Image (spheres, grey):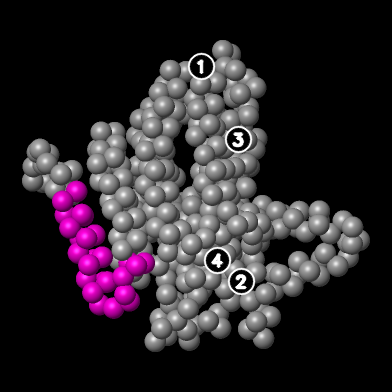
Amino acid sequence: MFDQLDQIFVTALHWLVSFVPEMLRPLVTPLICISFILAVFPAFFSIITIFERKGIGRIQNRYGPNRVGIPFTNIRLAGFGQFLPDGLKMLTKEDIVPRAADKIVHFLAPVVMLIPVLLAYSVLPFGRNMTLADYDAGLLFFFAVGGAVELAVFMAGWSSRNKYSLLGAMRAIAQMVSYEIPLILSAVSVVMIVGSLNLTDIVAHQNHYTFGIAHWHVFTPWGFIGFVLFFIASLAESNRTPFDLPEAESEIIAGYFTEYSGFKFALFFLGEYLGMFAIIGLGITLFLGGWTAPFSFLTWIPSWIWFFGKLTAIIFVFIWIRATLPRLRMDQLMNFAWKFMLPLALINILVAGIWHYMVADWQRWLVCGALIAGAYVLLGRGLMENQKLGKRIYRYAE
């Protein structure tokens, strides 16, 4: 029974394809999988936006959305239907394009933002036997299509013919390129240990248990620091707090999409959240065992529930960080990327190599842990050198 529940989507796919002529099945099967992705993740985006707004309101001791409930229900869920009028507003709002803008590039920018993000989902294993495109170089494909997002950001800023939009685009590209390097380097350590770029193989490498505990990469010194680096870099790549400088809402502009409105703005908003889901899914696959259970006695739970459970948990950590941390300055953001994260990611690759060739005993843990701790302390002190930080004083309004 549990195996049938685990493979319910695979079984449903085979059942649907059985109604299609044999010669058309190679074409129809990917279309059904794409339809699943287009249905599930935008719906997940709608739900998460409500939980984010209400969660941040609760954390900051203020009201979130509390008026629009779910229609035709007897249960009072005020605020949880807010995404419906928001979506209708975006669909019906007037699309304003600046007179001097390059209209073709201005129109294509949000499309170019969204398509690579959707392509990235094709290589993520959402569950056992649930990978749309099981490429041998799936990890390389993920990073390759993700590089097109920078192009979309530049297209949006340049085509608007607005100096503030262009400056916002340049600031966003500088941030994304700076943090993409430690993001990729943190994944290199996993590739070295597993010996494959195939994301399904990376999950299978972690699908083993010792004393009932999974062999997730995050449970090793190099995997833990790699996950921390990947997590921080994913915050910056997703333009999330405290790295949301490209679209700082406290300013009078909105970064590279200042001149966008209506459905085009909604596509940017959707693309950012779908990109965040995709990069979190990659982090789960690389370091948190993908769809595997943390303990052997929990393997009866369907694999896709584990994947989406981990995805939801990390998203709520993102929301928690947004509600509590202040925004960095631009110089702090760049210094942190180049003076701390990049050297630590390179050292972590060395530690992963040492871990691979040393005998599996306590000495391996001691050596690798000492190297990472020493690098963390030295790089942290170097980053904070000459920083004149006074004592923070909190005052309450009378």
Q: CA distance from mark 3 to mark 2?
A: 31 Å
Q: Nearer the viewer, mark 2 or mark 4?
A: 4
Q: Is residue 195 left or right of residue 56?
A: right
- Report the span colored magenta: 355-379
Compare marks 3 and 2 and give the one earlier in the sequence.
3
Q: Which residue is mark 4?
A: 201
Q: Of circles 3 and 2, which is in front?
A: 2
Q: Amino acid at mark 4?
A: Asp
Q: Which residue is mark 1?
A: 161
* Observer-nearest of 185 and 239: 185
**Label 1 residue SS:** loop
Q: Residue at x 55, y 66 (%)?
A: 201
Confirm whether residue 267 shows in the render.
Answer: yes
Q: Which residue is mark 3?
A: 112
Mark 3 or mark 4, which is nearer the start of the sequence? 3
Evaluate whether residue 230 shows in this view.
no
Callouts 3 and 2 close, C-beta under 8 Å: no
Can you give x and y, in whole percent of width and height, for residue 259 in the image?
52, 25
Label 1 Cα neighbours within 10 Å, binned few <14 / some 14-19 / many ≥20 = some
Q: Which residue is mark 2?
A: 128
- Residue at x-position 11% and y-position 41%: 385
Magenta span contains residue 398: no
On whether residue 358 falls in the magenta region, the answer is yes
- Dots 4, 1 in contact, CB < 8 A: no
Q: Pinpoint residue 347: horizontal percent, then vertical percent.
A: 28, 53
In the displayed structure image, the side of residue 313 where residue 5 appears, left or right: right
339 displayed left or right of 57: left
In the rendered image, the quadrant that contains the N terminus is bottom right
Label 4 environment density (alpha carbons within 10 Å; few <14, some 14–19, many ≥20): some
C-alpha separation, residue under disc 4 versus residue under disc 3? 30 Å
Q: Nearer the viewer, residue 118 or 390?
A: 118
Cα gap from disc 2 to disc 4, whole angstroms:
12 Å
